[in-house]
Amino acid sequence: MEVKLPKLGENAEGGVVVSVLIREGDTVTKGQTILELENEKAVAPIPSSGDGVVASLRVKEGDRLTVGQVIAVLTPTGGAAPAPTAAPAKAAAPAAPKARTSPPPAPNATPAPAEPEAVEEAAPDAPLPPASPEIRRVARELGIDLRRVHGSESGGRVVFADLREYIKRLESLASRRAAPAVTSPAPGPAPASVAPTAEPIDFAKWGAVSRQPLTILRRTISRRMAENWNTIPHVTQFDEADITELMELRKRFAPAYEQKGARLTLTSFALKAVVAALRRHPIFNSSLDEASQELVLKQYYHIGLAVDTEQGLIVPVLRDADRKSLFELSQEVSAMAEKARARKVTLEELKGGSFTISNQGGIGSGHFTPIINKPEVAILGLGKGALKPVVREGQIAQRLLLPIAVSYDHRLIDGGTAARFTVDLVEALQAFKEADVALV
């Protein structure tokens, strides 16, 4: 029997093999983890769909898999190994265009692509070719049927170069149909709808370099950050909160929390303060449904916590922050951070956030501009607290001030609303009392 990559979840169509846990000749049982797959920002265990001996292993570390792709072939225990499965035949080459008289091509010239008319219509029930989630997303947005695109990679996998080639062929056909039959126009700039291919740069001509491929996590971070920044008009509100008393409370009660298995940190206090501010300003706990042009006001408080890992930024979601005590929040924050750094968070644990906190104070940063985690509409950035002279009742006093930055979606939130939210957030951070921290 063939063990194939199962469906991973909503909008998850594949990933990269992080580790293969079986070898040919191994005996596996149904449900046993046979490999680990990195998808988006999570590493998921992939179980075997049956029992048997591994007769053929079809994947290795670093391979990019899509849902339905064969991972291994199993033979029943004690049975004969099945004959090797023949590799799928490549898609038939497009029919040759009709003969026509044309000048000979210039030396080293790239052959002209086949006419789009030669691409046959795909059967309605034909399977989609292998392609990354990003390729599928772009194809959907452009209205392209991937079954009509010839994949140039192994197994017929479609890559961006194939998509660009298909678009060029369609535009070439359209221009030939629209152009007068007399003479061809002088070459001009590429159509605006076709994204120009980046010119490769030889960095080595200026000195020694080394290269390393981007991991799927870094590619995901890059794509999402660009999408978030380009689609959301960001504005950032800056302020400072006096956390002198708050940190004194933390220092007093931290040992008691540790005795019960929890770390009392600034992030725990920030979660409580954020929920208080979100309750007073529900638009910060909302999303814009761009399809229906409706504002979605959420009745839950699921807070994303940006975790700095060796592989990159991961934002697991802490559910129902409004229903948990300071002690419970402290426990969950520590456990969540450890799980994220070990790459054990699931895809589901990365979804459903209503607001995000990014705390760079432990690194030593001051003010910064955090990027909103779409489809959320705001994010809080915390820097490192610093001792500063402050005038209080006509006297200069030394106080510990926390730099805070609130980035918000200006399509939904105006400057006045953001200023009021920030003021209330500062007040909530400064309002903690002993009774709020003490363990019962």
Image (spheres, rainbow, N blue to C red):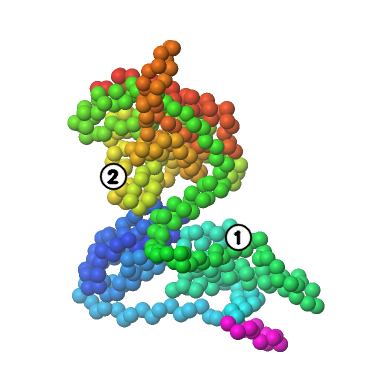
**Viewer-side residue, 266 vs 186:** 186
> Can you say whether 6 is above or below 116 in the image?
above
Q: Secondary structure at mark 2?
A: helix
Q: Residue furthest front?
A: 206
Work out which quarter of the rendered image holds the C terminus and state it. top left
**Viewer-side residue, 161 vs 368:** 368
The residue where tag 2 is placed is 338
Instruction: From the image, give the main secondary structure of the stretch colored magenta.
Output: loop
Give the quadrant of residue 62: bottom left
Work out which quarter of the rendered image holds the N terminus and state it. bottom left
Residue displayed at 27% across by 22% down: 438
Look at the image and tell me whether residue 319 can be seen. Answer: no
> Can you say whether 40 is above or below 385 in the image?
below
Residue 146: x and y, percent? 54, 67
Residue displayed at 39% across by 42% down: 306
Q: Residues within 10 Å of mark 1 (few under 14, many from 20)?
A: few
Residue displayed at 28% across by 35% down: 331
Sequence-wise, the earlier of marks 2 and 1 is 1
Q: Viewed as shown, does residue 34 lie left or right of 98?
A: left
Q: Amino acid at mark 2?
A: Glu
Q: Secondary structure at mark 1?
A: helix
Is residue 220 covered in magenta?
no
Mark 2–mark 1 Cα distance, whole angstroms, equals: 40 Å
Residue 432: x and y, percent? 35, 21
Residue 255: x and y, percent? 21, 28
The residue where tag 1 is placed is 142
Residue displayed at 36% across by 38% down: 364
In the image, which residues are magenta?
95-108
Q: Amino acid at mark 1?
A: Leu
